[in-house]
């Protein structure tokens, strides 16, 4: 049994995590927690939409889903401490089209966590 935690703040990150976990997650054996963080200064709808994508993509049995509010890294570290997953799945950045590469949240999580962290690529955005 593997326990996964998906850390998300956008539909793009959730979709990329679902694509990755499609090959690994055994719904009969494994457990999944999806944690969406409402970040200061970001629309509250982003986290809610990320959870809705998780509901649609992960199906049955439904994963545990949480929405937290506050600074992203402390909230995610708290969730990881509480759930103690075997693997943490994150997107390369917050899922915004203008962002490229690995963001500050992922960099900080990689620096601080002592467990497997999978950084999934986000879908390509149409750029002008």
Image (spheres, rainbow, N blue to C red):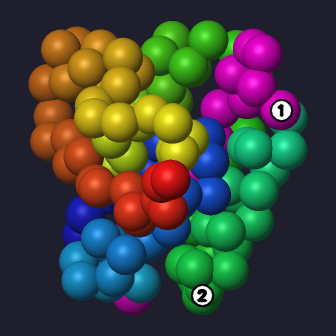
Badge 2: residue crowd in 10 Å (few <14, some 14–19, many ≥20): few
Look at 20% across and 24% down and name the residue there: 110
Q: Is residue 92 left or right of residue 42?
A: left
- The answer to whether 89 is drawn above or below residue 124 in the figure is above
**Disc 2 target residue:** 60
Look at 49% across and 62% down and name the residue there: 126
What numbered label is drawn on residue 43? 1
What numbered label is drawn on residue 98? none
Q: Nearer the viewer, mark 2 or mark 1?
A: 1
Q: Mark 2 or mark 1: which comes first in sequence?
A: 1
Secondary structure beneath label 1: loop
Secondary structure beneath label 2: loop
Res 67 → quadrant: top right
- The answer to whether 57 is drawn above or below residue 68 in the figure is below
| Residue 88 sits inside the magenta stretch | no
Distance in Å between CA atoms under marks 2 and 1: 29 Å
Is residue 75 visible from the viewing direction of this image?
A: yes
Q: Is residue 32 left or right of residue 87?
A: right
Q: Closer to the camera, 117 or 105?
A: 105
Q: Closer to the camera, 52 or 2?
A: 52
């Amino acid at each position: 049994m593997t326990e996964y935690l998906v850390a998300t703040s956008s539909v793009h990150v959730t979709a990329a995590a679902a694509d990755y976990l499609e090959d690994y997650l055994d719904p009969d054996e494994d457990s999944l927690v999806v944690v969406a963080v409402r970040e200061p200064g970001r629309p509250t709808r982003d986290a809610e939409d990320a959870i809705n994508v998780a509901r649609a993509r992960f199906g049955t049995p439904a994963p545990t889903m949480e929405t937290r509010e506050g600074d992203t890294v402390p909230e995610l570290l708290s969730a990881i401490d509480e759930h103690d997953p075997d693997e943490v799945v994150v997107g390369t950045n917050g899922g915004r089209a203008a962002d490229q590469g690995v963001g500050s949240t992922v960099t900080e999580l990689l620096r601080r966590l002592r467990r497997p962290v999978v950084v999934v690529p986000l879908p390509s955005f149409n750029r002008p």
